[in-house]
Image: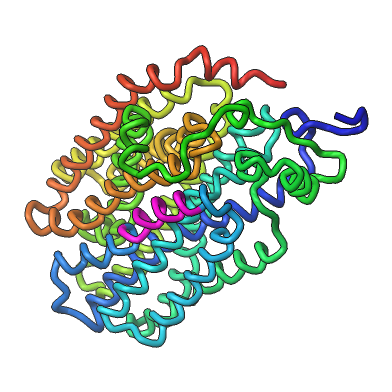
Amino acid sequence: MDKNSVNVADMPLRWGHFRVLIVASLGQTIGQGLATLVGIIIPMMQLMMHPELSAGMQGILGCTSLIGLMIGAIVFGKLSDRYGYLLFFRLCPLLMIAASLVAYFYHQIPVLLICLFVMGFAVGGEYSLDSDYISELMPDRWKLFMVGTAKASASLGGAVVATVCFFLIKAWDKASPWPNLLFIITAIAGLMLLLRIRFAQSPGWLMSKGMTAKAEQSVKYFLGPDAVMTVPPSTDKASPDSDESMGDFLKRNAKKLVFSGVPWACEGLGVYGIGIFLPILIMALGIDNLPPHATQINHIVNSVELTIWLSIIMMVGFMAGLLLLNKLYQVSMQSWGFFLSAAGLALLLIAYKLHWASWTAITGFMIFELFLNAGPHLITFILPARIYPVADRGTGVGASAAIGKMGAVVGAFFIPVLLQWGGSTLVLLVSIAVMLIGGIITAVIGPQILPKSKVTRDNKPS
C-alpha cells in the first residue's frame, strides 16, 4: 500500500461516507413510509369506497406488500450475490415508481394488491442490499453506528409520510382522493433512482469474486483516489459454491438464521403488524379523544396525527439505541428491548381494560415504540450483516429479512382478524406474547452466535 494511501477500515469520515449512507438509507425510509401509507389508506377505502371491506380483506391489503418484501429479500439477495449489487440497487426504485403509478391510475382492489406486492418486492431488495453497501464502506469504528443510522431512517419515513397524509386528508376533509397519496411513494422512489444513476458496484462483492482491480476503482469512486480496501480474509479461502441451492444454504446456516430471523419476525409484528394498523388500533382503543358525534374522517385525521407523534417516539428510540450501540452488548439490547416493549403493551392493555385516562394508554404505546426501536427494530437490522461472511452476505441478510418479514406478514394479516375475534384485548395479549418470545430466543441463542467477547473486540475504536 502506498504511504499516501489510507485504508477504508481506519480512515476518517468523508463526504463519500455520508453520500453512501444517505443513498442507501432511502430504502429504509421508503419501506416504513409504504407501511404507514397502507395503514392510512385502508380505513379511507373502507369509509368511502368499500364499506363492505371485511377484516380478512383488510388483512390481505395490509400484508400484501410485506409478502412481496419477504420474497424480494430472498430473490434480490441471491441474485445480488451472483450478479452484483448495483443493477438491483437501481432496479428496486424503478419498480416502486412503476407500481405506484399503475396503482394511482387503476386502483381497483385486484390491481392495488398486485401493485402493493411489487412495491414490497422492491423494498425487500432494498433490505438485502442497503446494509451491505454501508457496512463494507464505513471505517470500522463507525460501521455499526452508520448501519444503525440507516435503519433509524425508517422512522423518518413513517413520520414524513404520516405528516404529509395528515395535512392532505385534513385539507380534503373526505376520503375519496386517497389514490393521490400514492404519489408520495412515487416521489421518494424517484429521488432514490436519481441518486443512484451515478453510483458504483459494491467493492466488497467485487473482491469476493476476485475482481480486485475493479474493487479498487469502486473504492476510489466512493471515497477518493487515496482510499484503499484490504481484501477480506474470507476471500482468501474458497467461498461457498455460487450454485449452492437455497436449501443447502439454510442447512449450513440454520442456527444463524434462527438467531437473526426469528426475533426479526417477532419485531416485525410490532413494527409492521401494529404499525400498519396503528390508525385503526388507535380508533379501536378509543384514545383519539374525539366526541361521540365526530365523523369517521375526523377519527382518521386524529389517528394519523397520533401516528405522527408515535413516529417521533420511534426516532427518539432509534437515537437512544444508536448512542448505546457501541457501549452495550447488542444481544442484550435486543432481548431487553423486547421485554420492555412487552411491558409497554401491558400498560396499554391495563389502561384500556380499567378505563384509565387516555394519556396512560398513550404512555404505554410510547414505551412500546421507544424500546422496540431502541432495541429489536435497530439490532435485528444490524446483526445479519455481522454474522455472515462477505461471500454469502447478500443471501444471508436476504434470508434473515425474509424470515423477519414472514412475522410481519402474519401480524399484518391477523391484526384486523384478531380485532374482529376478540377486540383490542386479544390483539394486545398476542402482541405481548410475541415480544416475550423474541426476547427469550435472543437471550438464549444470541450469545452462542455472537459472543460478548467478539462484540467487545469489534467495538473498540480503531
Farthest residue toward the left?
Answer: 421
Place of residue 284 in the rendered image (x, y in percent of width and height, measured from the top left): 20, 58
Q: Which residues are magenta?
A: 67-79
Place of residue 145 in the rendered image (x, y in percent of width and height, measured from the top left): 60, 34
Task: Please indicate whether residue 408 sits to the left or right of residue 456 in the image.
Answer: left
Residue at 41% x, 82% y: name it: 102
Residue at 69% x, 32% y: name it: 231
Q: How is the model colour-coded?
A: rainbow
Relative to 240, does residue 329 appear above or below in the rendering?
above
Farthest residue toward the top?
Answer: 453
Farthest residue toward the right?
Answer: 4
Q: Nearer the viewer, residue 7 or 36?
A: 7
Residue at 25% x, 61% y: name it: 280
In terms of image quadrants, where is residue 285?
bottom left
Q: Would residue 242 be visible to someone looking at this image?
A: yes
Place of residue 208 in the rendered image (x, y in percent of width and height, measured from the top left): 61, 39
Task: Please indicate whether residue 462 sits to the left or right of residue 47 in the image.
Answer: right
Where does the C terminus fall, quadrant-wise?
top right
In terms of image quadrants, where is residue 413?
bottom left
Q: Nearer the viewer, residue 348 or 87?
A: 87
Task: Please indicate whether residue 345 sits to the left or right of residue 397 in the image.
Answer: left
Q: Nearer the viewer, residue 434 or 3?
A: 3
Q: Would residue 15 be visible to someone looking at this image?
A: no
**Residue 181 magenta-highlighted:** no
Relative to 217, does residue 235 appear above or below in the rendering?
above
Q: Nearer the viewer, residue 251 or 435?
A: 251
Name the main secondary structure of what is drawn in magenta.
helix
**Residue 71 magenta-highlighted:** yes
Where does the N terminus fall, quadrant-wise?
top right
Relative to 436, does residue 108 appear above or below in the rendering?
below
Residue at 35% x, 39% y: name it: 264
Place of residue 393 in the rendered image (x, y in percent of width and height, measured from the top left): 50, 39
